[in-house]
Amino acid sequence: MMLALLLAAALAAGAPATQQLRVERSFDSMGTTYTIAAYGDDRFALESAIDNAFEEARRLDHLLSNYREDSEWSKVNRLASHEAVPVSQELFDLLAKCVEYSRASEGSFDITVGPLMKVWGFYKGTGRVPHRAEIRDAMARIGWQNIQLDAKARTVRFLREGLNIDPGGIGKGYAVDRMVDVLRKGGLGSAIISAGRSSIYGIGAPPNEPRGWRVTLPDPRKLDKDVLEVFLKNESMSTSGTSEKFFTAGGQVYSHIMDPRTGFPAQGMLAVSVMAPKTLDSEAWTKPYFVMGRSWTERHRPKEFRVFLCEDRSEIACVSLP
């Protein structure tokens, strides 16, 4: 919901008064849809750069997808509980970054959270409140501290049986950053990339808008009203919110944003948007800021990050942290 509206607003803002060509295309990969819109003077150059960016997304699908049995990510999940698994430098560096996020976020970011998502029913899309015993069992099979990385041997080992890593919190952000690199190498200076409904990156600025790509965020409770307007210029924006996946039980709303430390969906927040130089960072940090709340976020966010939070109160309270 959220990023679809964001992208529509951003593309609408790019309507050119000049005669620059505009090319827009979409491609499905890694379980989501990537959309690129770009401006330039040479249609062949635009088409070629976009083709190469989508080819990079296809390559990453073979590396990071947990839906493909032949991906390197899936190989780690199959074998790492039993042996140290040699991996490519690219995957090792990405997993090391995930461990770094977990440590810095006090465990509120955790790529091993899959068993909890499963018992709460979010993988099937319906949602359910599990029994306490189910939560305890899932908690026994998660924990980022149980990912053992050996930089010298370049191997990954899981120290707990049943551990499983999920790229859902970082895969799209990483792919967008890689696609941005490809587009820039192809000579593109004005483009916007979105990954599904969670992450977006603006390269340069569209014609007629030197401030960058205009993006708006709707009110989490009143979707016909905007609560945020930003301009992305060589910057990313990622959003997580309760409206993406949720269910209601016993008068309580449970969102898909899990607190790995408690085993329960996080409470107290409706939406978090993070604007950062790298999409990997903006995507990864939306969930810790959602889980940990405004006070923690104010103390721990890097100075180069802009964060927008909408807290869950009787009257919605949204605040920007510039």
Image: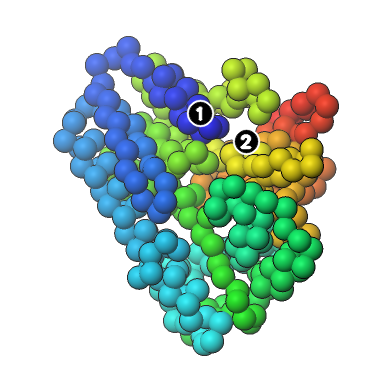
Residue that mark 1 sits on: 6
Residue that mark 2 sits on: 243
Tell me which numbered mark, 2 or 1, is placed earlier along the sequence.
Answer: 1
Q: Above or below — where is 155 with respect to 284? A: below
At 27% from the left edge and 52% from the top edge, which residue is drawn? 55
Image coordinates for residue 79, horizontal then vertical, percent = 48, 81
**In the figure, residue 12 lies in which quadrant?**
top left
Q: Secondary structure at mark 1?
A: helix
Scheme by which the image is coloured: rainbow
Residue 284 or 143: which is nearer the viewer? 143
Q: CA distance from mark 2 to mark 1?
A: 14 Å
Q: Is residue 259 visible?
A: no
- The kind of residue tagged 1 is Leu
Residue 275 or 225: which is nearer the viewer? 225
At 56% from the left edge and 48% from the top edge, which residue is drawn? 125
Residue 106 or 321: which is nearer the viewer? 106
Image coordinates for residue 310, horizontal then vertical, percent = 72, 32
At 45% from the left edge and 69% from the top edge, which residue is drawn? 73
Q: Is residue 256 left or right of residue 7?
A: right
Mark 1 Cα within 10 Å, few/some/many (few <14, many 20+)?
many
Q: Above or below — where is 267 with respect to 216? A: below
Q: Above or below — where is 291 with respect to 102? A: above
